[in-house]
Amino acid sequence: MDRLVSERGGVHRKEVRLLLAQGRIHIDGRPADSINQAVGPFTRVTLDARVLQANKARYVMLHKPSGVVSATRDKQHKTVIDLVSVPYSSELHIVGRLDFNSTGLMLLTNDGRWSRSLSDPQNNIAKTYRVLLEKALDDSYVKAFADGMYFDFEGVTTRPAELRILGQYEAEVDLIEGRYHQIKRMFGRFDNRVKALHRTSVGSLSMAAGPALGQWRELTLSELDLLGLEHCCLSPTE
């Protein structure tokens, strides 16, 4: 706390103790109780009537269309950030990319701790994909996905993935990790090209309750709680 107040309040760090004793520093609306009090990126800090920090945590669900890049900026193509047309869009980063031609659920946030937790395979949050393939499927795919596949480039074996055959050329896949082009590479072991890929859900979040193609909305507090990950209490309203 003392470092933040000194840097943003324009006071010497030694003066912060006096300001604290005078009750002039407030943390999230309450008088600060220690110069060593921890402040996070979304902690509201004021000195007298002056706001020194008041960032708001943002959690955005986007229905990505084909032909949009999963990047914050690109010189040639429209990016997913370009679709979120609000002043705070430049603060956001992407949680789990989708390929240029892939569609479906994408999440964006400015909360780095939340995005790291969501992407961590140890938290066992499944991402579900609908896949359209060039060649017919059979039960050998189910076993191969469940057993995991060794990727030479990374030198790792993929975690078990659940594959459900929906039709002759269509499947649904659950992953709890997200390696580079993982689904395409796994089907590539069968020399079967992925013609279309659509992410339908991430954990408890589903495109069934999501925005229309190319649209976005902020997650509700109840949706964040259902994911079971720690998030900032100052996040969006229900």
Image (spheres, grey):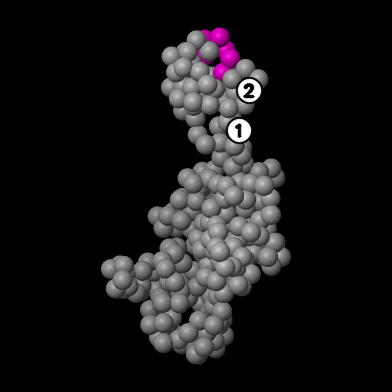
Question: Which type of secondary structure does the marked residue at label 1 adopt?
Answer: loop
At 42% from the left and 55% from the top, the residue drawn is 120
CB within 8 Å, label 1 to label 2? no
Highlighted range, magenta: 20-25
- Judging depth in this view, the residue of 105 and 69 nearest the camera is 69
Question: Which type of secondary structure does the marked residue at label 2 adopt?
Answer: strand
Q: In the figure, 31 relative to 174: above or below?
A: above
Check the picture and name the quadrant holding the C terminus: top right
- Viewed as shown, does residue 189 lie left or right of 238? left
Residue 10 drawn at (x, y percent): 52, 21
Residue 81 part of the magenta segment: no
At 57% from the left and 85% from the top, the residue drawn is 167
Query: How dense is the environment of label 1, judged by Cα within 10 Å: few (below 14), some, or many (20 and up)?
Result: few
At 56% from the left and 9% from the top, the residue drawn is 22
Residue 53 drawn at (x, y percent): 58, 31
Q: CA distance from mark 1 to mark 2?
A: 11 Å
Residue type beneath disc 2: Arg
User: Mark 2 sits on what residue?
Assistant: 50
Residue 166 drawn at (x, y percent): 56, 81
Instruction: Indicate which disc residue 54 carries.
Output: 1
Instruction: Indicate which disc residue 85 carries.
Output: none
